[in-house]
Amino acid sequence: MPQVCQTLIANEPCSQLTYLSGRNGGHLTPTAFNGFRARQAKYGVQEALRSYELEKYTAQKLIEIAKGGAPEFKHLGEEDITDLNHAVDLLENGHIALFMKRGEEESARADWKAARASGMKFKDGDVRWFTKQEMLAVC
């Protein structure tokens, strides 16, 4: 049986179908470096780096809450918000960005290079660049 790959692009934050299905259609994947040069130009290197750390921290805390591992937030409501595993459809699979317009890949690579040059740390495997042929082979 041939493999089929679909790329779905969400142009709106929430569609009617998303609303009716009860899913939020969002994600908790913090951006790794996208827009780094713009943040650096506007706020400086240290604030730009801190903004990405804050984004990672916030996403991690939300995941911990969903998995029931953040009892320090129990006092915030009547419900036991430390056990949301039953109510949250959580997938942790990373983030894939497809470049659809000319220049997007070059811009992303420039942000990545600037972030690394400014001291942002990436572990092996955090960022992987696929060629068009590699993506087509998966699809």
Image (spheres, grey):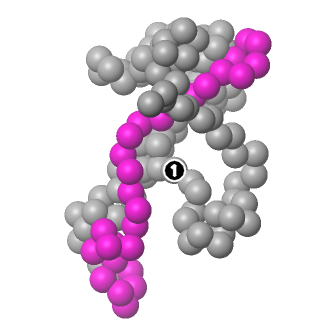
Q: Main secondary structure of the magenta part?
A: loop
Q: Is residue 81 above or below residue 77?
A: above
The kind of secondary structure element at disc 1 is loop
Residue kind at label 1, given as amino acid type: His
Expressed as whole percent of the image width and height from the top left, the position of residue 81 reads 34, 77
Residue drawn 59% across the image and 69% down it:
21
Expressed as whole percent of the image width and height from the top left, the position of residue 84 reads 33, 72
Residue 19 lies within the magenta run: no
Is residue 118 visible in the rendered image? The answer is no
Q: Is residue 28 above or below residue 66?
A: above
Residues shaded magenta:
76-104
Is residue 22 visible in the rendered image? The answer is yes
Query: As drawn, which residue projects farthest toward the front?
Result: 1
As rendered, which of 38 and 11 lies closer to the eye?
A: 11
| Mark 1 neighbour density, 10 Å: few (under 14) some (14–19) many (20 or more) | few
As rendered, which of 42 and 107 lies closer to the eye?
A: 107
Residue drawn 47% across the image and 21% down it:
138
Expressed as whole percent of the image width and height from the top left, the position of residue 124 reads 29, 17
The answer to whether residue 127 is left or right of residue 7 is: left
The answer to whether residue 22 is left or right of residue 75 is: right
Picture quadrant where residue 114 is located: top right
Expressed as whole percent of the image width and height from the top left, the position of residue 37 reads 63, 20
As rendered, which of 44 and 98 lies closer to the eye?
A: 98
Residue 92 lies within the magenta run: yes
Residue drawn 76% across the image and 19% down it:
101
Query: As drawn, which residue projects farthest toward the bottom?
Result: 78
The answer to whether residue 122 is left or right of residue 111 is: left
Q: Quadrant of the N terminus?
A: top left
As rendered, which of 70 and 27 lies closer to the eye?
A: 27
Q: Is residue 76 above or below residue 97?
A: below
The residue under label 1 is 27
Residue drawn 27% across the image and 74% down it:
83
